[in-house]
């Protein structure tokens, strides 16, 4: 599998704004990955969902569906599986809690003021 360049990425600030229900990876520690080309010459994760080399584009009654099984057909961060409630919850649990608007992230600025 080959990775495409960062210039070919489709995310903005660790989000996929073109997919209305996709979760945000921002502040989760998971870095958005660029699309890649698998061993069949199919681009995975570009959100175009079609490729001239894809078995789906060249389907016949002789095509074994198992040809599309395995990790090389699944993008780690641009996959429809992230849109499920269970996987969105996983991402939300990875994000640090939102502090009050005026709290310092590492120092208790109210110490000794009361």
Image (tube, rainbow, N blue to C red):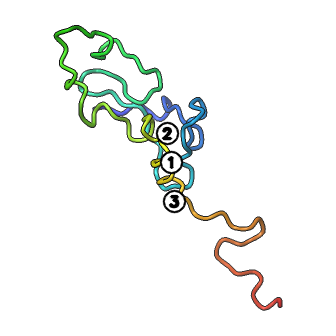
Q: Earlier in the sequence, mark 2 or mark 3?
A: 2
Q: Residue at x 54, y 38 (%)?
A: 22
Marker count (numbered) = 3
| Residue 101 percent location from the top left of the image | 76, 65
Q: Residue at x 24, y 30 (%)?
A: 69
Mark 1 neighbour class, 10 Å CA radius: few under 14, some 14 to 19, many 20 or more: some
| Residue at image mark 2 | 83
Point out which mark residue 88 bears.
Answer: 1
Secondary structure beneath dot 3 equals helix
Q: Image check: 4 left or right of 98?
A: left
Mark 3 neighbour class, 10 Å CA radius: few under 14, some 14 to 19, many 20 or more: few
How far apart are labels 1 and 3 at the CA level?
Answer: 9 Å
How far apart are labels 2 and 1 at the CA level?
Answer: 6 Å
Secondary structure beneath dot 1 equals helix
Q: Quadrant of residue 5?
A: top left
> Do callouts 2 and 1 mark residues in contact (Cβ within 8 Å)?
yes
| Residue at image mark 3 | 93
Q: In the displayed structure, would residue 45 be above or below residue 63?
A: below
> Do callouts 2 and 3 mark residues in contact (Cβ within 8 Å)?
no
């Amino acid at each position: 599998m080959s990775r495409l360049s960062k210039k070919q990425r489709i995310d903005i600030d660790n989000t996929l704004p073109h997919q209305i229900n996709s979760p945000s990876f921002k502040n989760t520690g998971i870095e958005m990955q660029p699309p890649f080309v698998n061993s069949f010459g199919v681009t995975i994760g570009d959100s175009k969902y079609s490729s001239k080399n894809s078995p789906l584009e060249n389907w016949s009654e002789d095509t074994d569906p198992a040809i599309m099984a395995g990790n090389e057909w699944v993008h780690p961060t641009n996959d429809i599986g992230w849109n499920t409630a269970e996987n969105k919850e996983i991402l939300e649990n990875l994000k640090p809690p939102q502090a009050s608007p005026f709290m310092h992230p590492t120092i208790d600025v109210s110490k000794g003021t009361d």
